[in-house]
Image (cartoon, rainbow, N blue to C red):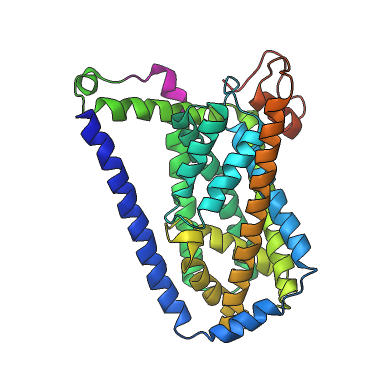
Amino acid sequence: MGKSWARRVPAKLLVRWLAGLLLSAIFLWAVLRGINLGRVGSILAGANRELAIPALLAFMASVAARSWRWLLCFEDDDPLAFPDSLMAYSLGSVSAFVIPARLGDLVRVYAVGYTSSVSRARALGTLVVERLSDLFAVVLLVSAMLPLFNLPGWVTSADVVAAILCVCALVVVYWLARQRERLSLPSWVVSRRLLEPGGRLFLRLLDGFGAVRDARRGAAIVGLAFLVWLLTVSSYVASFRALSIPLGWREGALLTGVLALVAIVPAGPGYAGSFELAAVALLGLFKVDSSVAVAYIEYTRIISLLSLALMTLLGALATRLRRQMPRLPATSPAATALDGAVPGAFDSSGGGQ
């Protein structure tokens, strides 16, 4: 029974993988059928190489902020340090350019479990908290931009749906986190070999929700989420300038938020197709030609991939150097990271429990 349950998991992932590829194929067909690909290549070839540097640095900084935020989602007793979270996060994000339907998150979970011996089930639970902080920041970002532009109804609808999802998910996650110590598997689940492994996995996932019980740690996670998106907007605006697109911070912030909402829908590798479709529709409102919009998305995708590859190498190097250094007295990784984000938030007695 247990083995048959384990064999069904890859089949589910395969279905999700194929569904992501199918969605990307449909989106790409819808966008590229009217695009001059030769012009797209010419625009990319003519990009200002010097302005690629600030775009690259801003995105690398956003990756570092994301990794730091993810570290805060873990507990004091998790044997995890910033180099581990940096390498795992970057590696998982790089793999998303090859693996569709957000399955790169599973690579991240596996990588952090391999490098730090953190429970992979708990690491999977922390992704829920991390994604919620992202969704909260993105909803506020898009909501702040809506009054500044005359936008089509689908943008407002997407923002409203995302806000409802965020509130509902936050309530559920907070309740589960508060109830975790009192939750246990009912006897009817324990007595069934088919259900028992899934039930135990669910309880281990709940261990990753602990960050929402601590107000100060939660505030630091949300604060880093806003920093992440501010840096991402900076990278997108630098990319506007590199391609000589006459748009600024407001348009960059709006595009960043809309693309983040689009990313909620699982699609192909690197969100191929879905990002192009959203960019063509949104940038078209600002009189940006479809070929230019597609070139812009490909340019930002290249910047993202280069940034993630560099951060993966930096994380791997830092992890290796840390392992070669003499062991220091044990400290709490989460508390250490939070002390940097919110001075004085933790004392020597620990917190976040």
At 45% across and 37% down in the image, what residue appears?
171
Establish if 200 lies above or below 40.
Answer: above
Establish if 89 lies above or below 195.
Answer: below
At 30% across and 30% down in the image, what residue appears?
198
Q: Is residue 24 visible?
A: yes
At 70% across and 72% down in the image, what residue appears?
240
Give left or right: position of 48 versus 95: right
Residue 237 within the magenta-colored segment of the rendering: no
Instruction: Please give the count of numbered marks on the rendered protein.
Output: 0
Q: Which residue reaches farthest right?
A: 50
Kindly indicate the quadrant of the structure image that contains residue 306. bottom right
Q: The C terminus lies in which quarter of the figure?
A: top right
Q: The N terminus lies in which quarter of the figure?
A: top left
Q: Which residue reaches farthest front?
A: 324
Picture coordinates of residue 101 (x, y %)? 42, 55
Front residue of this view, candidates 238 and 44: 44
Picture coordinates of residue 79 (x, y %)? 59, 23
Picture coordinates of residue 97 (x, y %)? 52, 58
Give left or right: position of 13 versus 210: left
Picture coordinates of residue 315 (x, y %)? 67, 41
Image: magenta residue range: 177-184
Q: Which secondary structure dominates the residues rendered in magenta?
A: helix
Give left or right: position of 92 versus 47: left
Q: Is residue 230 visible?
A: no
Front residue of this view, candidates 96 and 352: 96
